[in-house]
Image (spheres, rainbow, N blue to C red):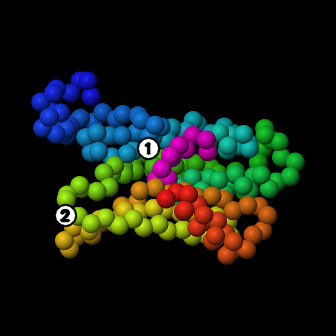
């Protein structure tokens, strides 16, 4: 903000369309020219052997504080849960081939996220708009999640934008589906 002339700040802050500069903030990337959040997935070349430590290291690089890519992250956590179910598997031991193939395919598909762009602005700010906040949660036998939406109504135009979401892997101990639905509802209440 210090580099922006006062006359631009007084008339409203705009950024030239030619500006392709990306700013990293809170672990996310913001592109001012399009006012959108972006992801940069820079995973190192996979080693010839995939271990529990390597998978967990890759998962920790997926930083998503507001849950934009929650469906992608939960997939990684489900694979990690499969690894944890293997008894007597050390941190530096090779995971079974079935999990290696699954992880390699998943890891290769993460590069698609580099092309994802999500608008930062969720409401236009006009005075004659009506806002509604909606929450949704759901569960399956393997995971549950919740998301929070903002519905904007301006005359006859309705827009819906997701504000944030969270997801969790279901516990290894078998829990009934209604109880997992309640876990999803609790997660939604905390999210709101």
Above or below residue 55? Residue 19 is above
Position of residue 98 in the picture relative to residue 192 (left or right): right
Position of 138 relative to 21 (above/below): below
**How many other residues sit within 10 Å of disc 1, few (<14), some (14-19) or many (≥20)?**
many
Residue 154 drawn at (x, y percent): 21, 67
Q: Is residue 173 magenta?
A: no
- Give the farthest residue toward the top: 3
Q: Please tell me how many numbered marks the rendered image carries.
A: 2
Q: Residue at x 64, y 70 (%)?
A: 182
**How far across and down, in percent of the image, does residue 161 sit?**
36, 61
Residue contact between numbered discs 2 and 1, judged by CB atoms under 8 Å: no
Label of residue 103 in the image: none
| Mark 2 Cα shell of 10 Å, populated few (<14), some (14-19), many (≥20) | few
Nearer to us in this view, 79 or 104: 79
| Residue 96: percent from left, percent from top | 77, 52
| The one of 82 and 47 positioned closer to us in this rendering | 82
Q: Mark 1 points at which residue?
A: 39
Give residue 157's position: percent from left, percent from top: 22, 70
Mark 1 element type: loop
Q: How many angstroms separate mark 2 from mark 1 (CA)?
A: 34 Å
Which secondary structure, mark 2?
loop
Predominant secondary structure, magenta span? loop
Residue on which the image places disc 2: 128
Q: In terms of image quadrants, where is residue 183?
A: bottom right
Looking at the image, which is closer to me, 128 or 184?
128
Stretch of the chain drawn in magenta: 59-69
Residue at 68 percent across and 40 percent down: it is 54
- Is 156 left or right of 116, judged from the image as shown? left
């Amino acid at each position: 903000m210090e580099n922006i002339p006062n006359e631009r700040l007084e008339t409203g802050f705009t950024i030239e369309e030619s500006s392709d500069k990306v700013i990293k903030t809170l672990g996310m990337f913001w592109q001012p020219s399009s006012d959108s959040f972006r992801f940069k997935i820079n995973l190192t070349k996979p080693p010839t052997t995939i271990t529990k430590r390597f998978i967990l290291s890759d998962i920790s690089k997926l930083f998503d504080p507001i849950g934009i890519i929650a469906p992608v992250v939960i997939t990684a956590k489900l694979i990690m849960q499969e690894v944890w179910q293997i008894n007597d598997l050390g941190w530096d031991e090779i995971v079974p081939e079935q999990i290696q193939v699954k992880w390699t395919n998943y890891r290769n598909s993460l590069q698609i996220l580099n092309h994802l762009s999500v608008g930062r602005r969720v409401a236009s700010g006009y005075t004659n708009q009506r806002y509604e906040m909606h929450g949704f949660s759901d569960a399956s036998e393997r995971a549950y999640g919740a998301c929070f939406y903002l519905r904007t109504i301006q005359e006859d135009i309705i827009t819906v934008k997701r504000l944030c979401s969270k997801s969790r892997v279901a516990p290894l101990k078998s829990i009934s589906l209604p109880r997992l639905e309640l876990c999803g509802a609790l997660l939604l209440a905390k999210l709101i």
